[in-house]
Amino acid sequence: MARKGKKPGSFSVSRRDFLKTAGVVSAVTAAASPTEAEAQAAAVRGVGPGEVPVRLMVNGKRLDLMIEPRVTLLDALRMRADMTGNKRVCDRGTCGACTMIVDGRPVYSCSTLAIECQGKTVRNIDGLAAGTALHPVQQAFCDKDALMCGFCTPGFIMASVALLEKTPNPTPEQIRKGLDGNICRCGTFSRIMEAVSSVKGVTRG
Amino acid sequence: MADFRDEQGRGGQAPPPPPADPKYAWLPKQGVIGTSIKRLDGPEKVTGRAKYTFDIARPGMLYGRIVRSPYPHARIRAVDLSAAQKAPGVKAAIVWRDPANAQRNTVMFQGDEVAGVAADTEEHAIDAARLVKVDYEVLPHITLVDQVLTGSAPAVFQDGNVRQGAVQETGDLAAGFKQAAQTIEETYSTHVITHVCLESHGTVCEWEGDRLTAWVSTQGVNAAREGLATGLGIPQPNVRVITQYMGGGFGSKMGPGAEGLICAKLAQEAKAPVKLMVDRKEEHLATGNRPSATARIKAGVSADGVLTAFDAETWGTGGAGAAAGFPLPYIYLPPNRRRTHKDVYINTGQQRPMRAPGHPQGSFITEVLMEELADKIKMDPIEFRIKNLPPEAPNAMWATYLRQGAAEFGWNKRHPTGDTTAGPIKTGMGVAINTWGGGGRGPTQVRCEISSDGVVVVKCGTQDLGTGTRTLVAVVAAETLGLSPAMIRPEIGDTMYGVAGASGGSTTAAGVSPAVRIATFNALEALKAKVAPALGVEATALVASNGRIQVKDNASKGLSWADACKQIGPQPISVEGNWQPGLSSVTTSGVQFAEVSVDIETGIVKVNRVLAIQDCGLIVSRLTAESQVYGGVIGSLNFALFEDRILDRNTGQMVNPNMEWYLLAGMSDVPRIDVRLIDQPERGVIGIGEPPTVSTAAAITCAVRNAIGVTVRSLPLTPAKILQTLAQQRRA
C-alpha cells in the first residue's frame, strides 16, 4: 500500500515507509545510510563468538560490559546491568514491550544487538523519571489508569515519549500510528489513548 | 426472586447470603469506596521499578531452559545429557521424563517437557539445551477433531479419543418442535486461542537446605505453594512463594506448572538459585489454551417469538486428555431442550481456564442462533431476546440494560439484516448479553497492624494480577479507618501473609474486600479502646472520620490520626479478619452493543464502537473496575477477529507460536468503547474480571451479519472467511 507511487530505485526508502505503515517503525535498526552501515559492519567483523568489551551510553551514563556479540541490547541491560524495566515478551520485534529510544528513535531492543549501539545514546524506562519526579507521560499513565498488569507499560511509555518528542501535539490518528507497534494483552489501549492525548509540553530529552 | 440456573447451576440467582455480623456491614453512604482512586502501584510500574518474577535477580543465579518434544506424540527411548553437561557454563541437567517408566516416558503434544538444563548465562542454557540428545520413537498422533469424529484417527488415548457426556434433557422436545412456526438447523463453532500472557510462565527458585523460596508468576501464591510442595514431595510450610507483580495470567497461572518443578529441581542439583522463564513459543504450546466449541443445533420458535425447542449435539477439544465444556443454551432457557456433549482429545497442549471459561463459546453459539431465529419470524432481535429472557432479578437485569443500551446506542437507526447502501463498506449493529457467577469465598485471612507512628499495614496472601487488588485493599481499609488510601500500606503477594484463594473466577475482589473490611474494623475497635480514656469518653462513642478519631458529630472532641495512634504504645495493634458471607454476592449481568463496518471487497471487519453495560454489585474502586471492562471488551474483540491457534494438519505442529502470526489487536484496531457500570451497593462486592469478556465477540458477529446480510457461524471472522461466506451466498 505504502509503496504505491514510489520509484523502483527508491526501495530502501519505501521499505522503511512500509514498515512505518505496518506499525513496526521501532523495529528499524537498518536506518543508517549505506556508508554508516558498512563502517559498522567493518567494526563488528571478526569479533566474538566469546565475550568482548562493549561500551554503551545509557541514560547519560557510561556502561562497560563484557558480553558475547550475539547479546541484544535488551538482554545486555536486563541481565548484565539490572535495568529490568523494559520487558522481553515476543522476542521477535513485534510487541514493543522492549521499546527503547536510541539516538532519538524508538527501537525494539530485543531485536537490536548491544554491540551495534556503541557510540549511540540509549534511553530506557529505568532512566526516564528524574529521581522521584515522574516524566509527564508516566504521570499521565498513572492518572488515567493506562496500565493493568504493567508488563507492556514501559514499552508503551517509551514509544509515547518518542512520539511526543517528535510530534508534541499529535492527532488521535498520529497517536494510533505511533503506538501501533506495541501490544497490550490486558486491554489498556483506550486509556493509553486518553493518557497520551492528555500530555502537554514534552520536549526532546 | 427468579431462578434461571441451568443444570450446572450456572448463571442463577443464588439464595441471598446469610447476613454477616451486622456491625461489619458496608456503610450506607460510602466515602472513598466507589470513587476513582489511582492505582497505588502505578508509579512502580511506569518507572520500571516494579520487580516481576521475570526481573528477579539473586546472587549466583543461573538460567534454566527446558528441552521439549518437537513431536506431538512420541515415546522416549533414551535421553543423553552428557554433551550438554560438558557445555560451557552448565551447572545442572535433569531428565524430566523417565524412559524406563511406562507411565512417564510418553510425550503427548509438541512442547511437552522432556529435560532441563541450567547454566551461568541464558545464552549458554539455550546452547546446552540444544545438545541434549533425545531418542524419540515417534507415535501416531491426532491433529484434527474431524479425524476423531469421522473415525479416521488412530487410537491414541488410553480410554478412547472421545469422552461422551450424559444426555441432558428437559421438557418435551417433540412437543416443542410441534409448537414451532419456524425451525433452524445449523452448526456453530469457536476456535482454540491461547492466553498469551505478556510475562511468560516461570519461576525463580532458591533453596536453603530443605526450604524453598520461589518467586512464581502465578495467580495464586498459596496454590503455587501447594503445587510445588506436592510436586517436590516436601512439606508445604517449607515453601514460600512470592509474587509481588505479575504480568498477566487470564486463568493459565493457577499453579507452578511443570516449568516451576523443573526449575526447583535444577536449583536443587546446581545448589544455586535458578531462573526459568519459558519463551514465547513454549508459552503458546504448553501453558494452556481456551478449548474449541462446536454445536450442531436444531431450534424452533413460535410465530410470536417464543423459543419452543432446542436440540444440540456439541463437542470441543481441550487438547491431550482435557475437557472442553461450555454452557448451552446460554442464559435463554427454552422449556424443551436436549443436549449431548463430548470432549474430543487431540495431541496438543492441555486447555486451562481462560477468562470466563466456557462462556464466550456458549454466548457466541447462542446469540448468533438467536439473531437468525429473530429474522425467521421477522422480529426485532432485542424484543426477541427480551421475550425469551428469564424473569428480571437483581442479578438478571438484561431486559432493563437492553432497553437502556438500545436508547443510548441508537438501535432505532439499525437497518434490517443486510446493509443496502451502495459501495463496498457495509455497516451493522449487534448485541449480546452475559452473566458470570464470581462472588467471594473463604478462607481469606487478613491481618491489620497499626503502630504508634500511625502506619497501617494490611497483609493478605492474595495477589495482584494487574486487576488492582493492592489498590482495592487500600480503598477498603481507608474507608473503614477514615483515612486516604495512600496512608494504607497493603502487603500482598506472599505466602507469609496467610491463606487466601487463587485469583480465578472473579472471586478476588469479593473474597478480599469483606476480609479487609472485617480486619480493619476490628483494628479500629482496638484503637478506639486505646483512645477513649485519653478523651474521657466511651469507646463506643468514637468514630473514624477524615483522618481523625473523634466523638460522633463532634470533630472538636477528638484526636488526629497521628495523635490517636500515639496512644497505642510500644506494642502495635495486630488483629485478624476472615471472609464472611453477607458483604459480597454472586452473579452479574451485562449487555454489550457493537457497531461494525465490513469491507466486502477485502473482507476486513472494523469495529467502530462498543457500548458495555455491566453490573458488579458494590463498586470498590471505580477506575480499576472500568479498566476491567475495557480490557474484557478488547480481549473478546481479539477472540472475534484476530486470535487463532493454527495447527499443521500433517505434522501436528503449531505454525504461529509467536506474536507476529498469532494476531492481537493494536491501537488502530481498538474502537471507541463506552463503559456503563451499574451501581448495586446493596448487593455487596462481586467480581468483574470475567463477565465483560463474554459477549463482545457475539455482539460483533451479530453486527457483521447485520452489515453483510450473511451469517458467519464460526470464529474468527478473518477477511478470508468473510469473503468465502459472501461467495457461498452468491453461488447459492
Image: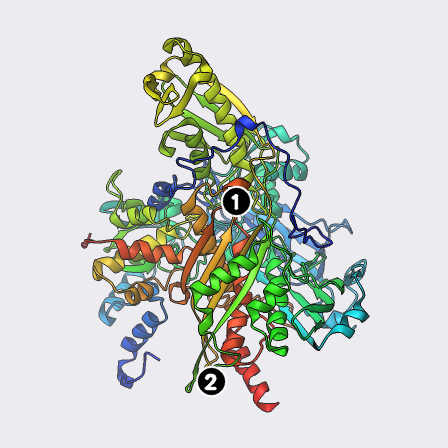
Which residue matches tag 1?
B617
Decide if residue B353 is on the left or right side of residue B44: right
Pick out the residue farthest to the bottom.
B731
Residue type marked 1: Gly
Give the image quarter of residue B78. bottom right
Decide if residue B723 is on the left or right side of residue A192: right
- B588 lies above or below B17: below
Q: Residues within 10 Å of mark 2 (few under 14, many from 20)?
A: few
- B252 lies above or below B194: above
Depth order, front residue of B67/B323: B323
Residue type marked 2: Thr
Percent from the top left, x then y, of residue B292?
A: 64, 64
Is residue A186 visible from the viewing direction of this image?
A: no
Which mark identifies residue B420? 2
Q: Secondary structure at mark 2?
A: loop
Percent from the top left, x then y, of residue B607?
A: 44, 69
- B668 lies above or below B49: below
Q: Secondary structure at mark 1?
A: loop
